[in-house]
Each structure stands twice: as structure tokens, then as C-alpha cells.
Image (cartoon, rainbow, N blue to C red):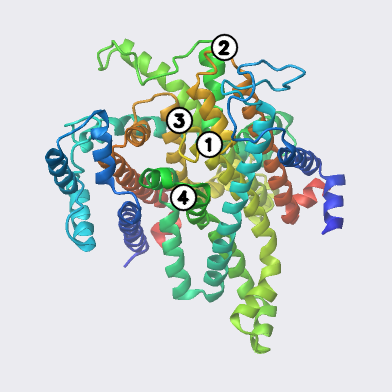
Amino acid sequence: MFKVLIDLLRYNREFAIGFVLTAGIFLFALAHFWAPLPDTAIYLLPPDMPPSTEYWFGTTSRGQDVLWQMSSAIWNTMLFGLTVTIISRILAVAVGMVSGYLGGRWDQAMMTINDTMIALPNIPILLLVYFVMRDSMSWPILALTAALLGWNYDARLIRSVTLSLRNREFTRHAVFAGMSVPQILVRQHLPYVMPVIFFTAMNNLIWAIGLEVTLSVLGFSDINRPTIGGMIYWANQHQAIIAGIWWWIAFPIGAIVLLFLGLFLLAISVNEYIDPRSRLSRMGA
Amino acid sequence: MNGFAKYLVQRLFQFFLVIFLGVSLAFLITNLSPVDPVEQSVALMTNFGATDPRAVELMREALAELYGLQGTVLDQYLSFWGRVIRGDFGPSLSAFPTPVMSLIMSALPWTIGLLTLALAISWSLGNLLGALAGYYRSNLLLRLSGAAVMALHPVPAYIIGLVLLLLLGFIWPVLPISGGAQMNLQPGFTIDYIYSLILHGTLPALTLVLVGIGSWFISMRSLVSNIVTDDHVVYAELGGVSSGKIFSQYVARNALLPQLTGLALSLGNVFGGAVITEFLFNYPGVGRLLIQGIYRGDYSLVLGVTTMSIIAVAVAVFIIDLLYPLIDPRVRLS
């Protein structure tokens, strides 16, 4: 694992850039534990201060330091994304592997339901959930809802890998050796599925963070908990663009773009690493 | 039964399953929530001052009837289905007494127009660029444009839209940033009106294109670069078939099949992006309607728009499924 990481860092430029970006943003987010003021406090600092040596990224109209707000916001946004990713991975792996291994009618039934869920539009359903929950909406409920909507596509992908493993020699050996289905799935097939899980996890993380940004920009989450989308929501509420407080909007957008770019570069370089054909073409074959 | 009929039956079954599950889900979400929509609406309406308690009681009953919340859960479920089939979601509370359905119907053409246009552009452009980039791997221009669309692809629609709005509507104000057409123009087939439609639609459509194009590019490029090494392509190359023909007939055509399936599968997601984009640019489609309904606490409007958008997406997926046999002869013949 470590060796792979070092090789990737040395030979794959996209991975190196993505790794540095993501790690940098992670460290920046980690810094919020040492913030001088609590992140939910408002009107403790002079409002609307432009970036200066005292407030590097300026202050908001609500009297908050943009720099420290961003640090907490990225942390909360990433936490949301990871929660969604982990829950939805468990679902995708379970459904995908079982469906692919069982095959036949079971597979057909499970994939029909799976395809049905893919065709449902996520955003209207999430908005409906928010609408009926209103003030009782908290980020874990939102994360759970997003996770329940975000696993279908990847379950299909994982299923197709398992489907091809099913007819391989070693699966038959394992069956004859008397291994049970869960044992075969976990000990024989999971190592082959692992790269796909990792790749889909990266994409799912990007999707989940995008979802969080979108919903909180509209104010459809706990608006007092700092998140990247929440910062833009408050900036819009105070008409920051018209008032000329550009730093309240520009820095969060910059942070989001950098975070997405980092995660995306990691995702595509991991995908390339998994796919041997593109690895060969990179080496010039 | 021949292959096409079998395919059709299968797709039709899937279509009805999506609608059944989607409508049931919408019902379930509204029913399981701890918040009572009747109390919520009553609180909204009595906000402005003291109201006679008897009037409030009458209002409660009227609302429960309006929302179909009388009787057992099964009764409510069946009456919800009845309302969906009749297309009757009752009057909207925020635009009383306009029926929810007529609000949706006047908003739907805007969304369909915007989405169809944006999808057509991003799908064809993304696939064309992706196919070229997969076929001519060493072309620098293709690689650069590929890097650009791929970098945009993970960024959420709202952020891309906001940046475009700031750049082209605020810093360098060349395009209108709000509405579907100029307010004082009479809708109709006049040059002025159509010009205004195009002008107003540019920023929302551009946002959706920029959001969508990257994923088509990525998947098309990897599909094509896998097909290029296939035996039938190598054989055609050795046989002296012109490279333009190999590209269009041997490679791109095969790679388009999974991309069409992908289009059907991604429609739900694309619709979500359109909801956000419409709201950002104040575009008069169903997305803006939905978000305004949420802000105003309009229960029947939100439920109506959600249900109708689930059905609309299912219909669109079904239409694409019907197109599939046209480009894949195997479905027709087998």
C-alpha cells in the first residue's frame, strides 16, 4: 500500500497534484480545532473588513473571520461527504456483490429495482425530505438520505465485476472446497472488487460534497453550522456581491474549486492505475 | 415474440415500476415525517395576527381534506394515487386559488426546452470531443480541451452558474441574469421575443452544458481508446479503410451505444442540476417553482412538483429507451 502510494506520487503527475491539494485542504480544515473563536459565534469581530494582515481573508457582514469560517466549513463539508460515502459504499458493495454472485433471477430482480432507483431524480426527493422535516432536519439525516439515494450506479459497476469473477476457476475451487457464499464473497472476491470500490468511493465523495454545497447554498440544511455552501448562503442573504464584499464569496468558491480539483485528480489517477491498459499507454507502450 | 417486442415489454415494465416506486416514495416521505403539513400551513396563515379559533378549526378540516390526509394510511395512499392519475394536486396555497397542476404545466415547457437544448449540446459535443481525444491520443489541442472540460465536471452546477453569473452578468454585463424572457414583450413567434428567449436562456444553458460535458467526454474517451485496439478495427486498418471511416463507422458508432444508455441513466441527475440552475437564474421552470414552494411552505405545490418531476423523468428515460433500437440493430433482430 505504502509502496504504491510512493510510486504514484513519483510517476503520476495528476496523482501528485491531487494528493498535495487534498492534503493541503485537509490540513487547513484540521486547523479549525485551534480557531481563536467558536465557529458559530457571530458579531464578535468588526464586520465587512477587507483582507488585511489582521484578517487574511477579511471578515463577513456577520462579524466572522472568513479564514476561520472556511476552515470549519471545509471540515464539516468533508465530514458530510465521508459519511455519505461510507454508508452508500456498504449498500453498493452488499447489493452489487450479492447480485453479481447469485446471478439468474435474483440478479435480475435486484438489478430491476436498482435501475428503477437510478431513474429517480435525487434533488427533488432530497428537497421533499427537507421540506417535510423542516427544522428537525440535521446533517446526519441529510447524509443518510443522500446515502440511500447515492449507491445504485456503483452497485451496478460492482455487480459487473463480480459477475465476471463468478465464472473464474478459483471461484469453482472455493465452492468445491466447501466455502460458504459469504466466505467466498469476502475472502475470494472482495480483493478484486476493492479497486472498483475505491474508485467509486472517490466519485461518490465528490458527488456528496457537491450535493451538500448545493443544498446548503439554498439554505436547505442546518444554516447555523458553518459549511461551504452555508457561507455562500449567508453571503447571498447579505447581498455581499452588490455590497462589494467580494471576499465573502470569492474565497469559499476558490476553496470548493480547489477541493474538487484535488479529489477529481486523485479519482482519475486511481482509475488509471486500476486500468492496466491506460497504465501501459502511459509507459509508452 | 421477436426481439423488439420483448425489449419493448421489458422497458414498459421498468417505466411503470419507476413511476410506482417514485410516487409511493413521495407518499411515504410526506407521511412518515414528524411534521404535520396541516399544522404547518395553519401556523403560516395565522402568523399575521389572532384568528378566531372556530375559523382555525374549520381551516384545519379543509386543509386535511385538501391534502388528502383523512382516513387510514391505506385510504390516503389510494386517494393520493387517484390524485396523481387525475393530475389534481389541489390549489396552491402561495398562489391561491391557482391549481398546482396549471402552475406546473406553465412551467414545464421552460424546463423541457432548457434541458433538451443543454443535454443535446453537452451530449453531442462531449461525445464528439471524447471520441476524437480517444482516437487521436497525441493531439495537443484535444488534450488541452479535454483537461478543461474534465476540470469543470466535478464542480456543482450552482458554483459554475454563480461564477458565470458574476463574470458575464456583473463584471462584464453582456447577458441578462434573470428570467426567461424580457418582461414587457408579448410571447409569440416574433423576432424580438425569440431573440430575448435565446438571450435569457444562454447563461442557464451554458451552465448546464459546462456541468454535463465532462462526464460524457471522460466515458467516451475511455470507451473509444478500448475499442481502437479491438480486432475488427485493426483488421480494417490493415485492409486500408480510410481513417475517417474507421473513426465514424467502426469506432464511434460502437462506443455510442453505452453512451445512450448512460444518457437514460443520468437524466435524473441532470434534472437535479436544472432545478438548481433555474433557481439561480430565476428561470421560470419547474425547478424554480419547487424551490419557491419550499420557501413559501406550499405543501401541495412541493408534493405536486416532486411527483410530476419523477414522472416526467421516467417518461424521458422511456423515450430514450425507445430510440435505442434505432441505433442498435441487435435489439431489432435478435
Please, is residue B164 above or below residue B330 in the view? above
Can residue B125 be seen?
A: no
Residue B152 x/y as whole percent = 61, 33
Asked if both marks, 2 and 3, belong to the same chain, the answer given is yes
Asked if both marks, 2 and 4, belong to the same chain, the answer given is yes
Q: From the viewer's perspective, tell me whether residue A264 is left or right of residue A215.
A: right
Label located before the other in sequence (2 or 4): 2
> Between residues B32 and A199, which one lies in front from this camera angle?
B32
Query: Residue beneath label 2, please?
Result: B171
Residue type, mark 1 in image: Asn
Q: CB of mark 4 within 8 Å of CB of mark 1?
A: no
Q: How many other residues sit within 10 Å of disc 1, few (<14), some (14-19) or many (≥20)? A: few
In which quadrant of the rendered image does the C terminus of chain B lie? bottom left
Residue type, mark 2 in image: Ile
Residue at screen point 38% across, 34% down:
B291
3D distance between C-alphas at marks 3 and 4 = 20 Å
Where, by quadrant of the figure, is residue A127 drawn? top left
Residue type, mark 3 in image: Thr
3D distance between C-alphas at marks 2 and 3 = 20 Å
Callout 3: chain? B
Asked if both marks, 1 and 2, belong to the same chain, the answer given is no
Q: Nearer the viewer, mark 2 or mark 4?
A: 2
Q: From the viewer's perspective, tell me whether residue A137 is left or right of residue A253.
A: left
Query: Residue beneath label 1, please?
Result: A224
3D distance between C-alphas at marks 2 and 4 = 37 Å
Residue at screen point 45% across, 30% down:
B277
Residue B309 x/y as whole percent = 34, 43
Query: Residue beneath label 4, please?
Result: B265
Q: Determine the secondary structure under disc 1.
A: loop
Identify the disc placed on residue B277: 3
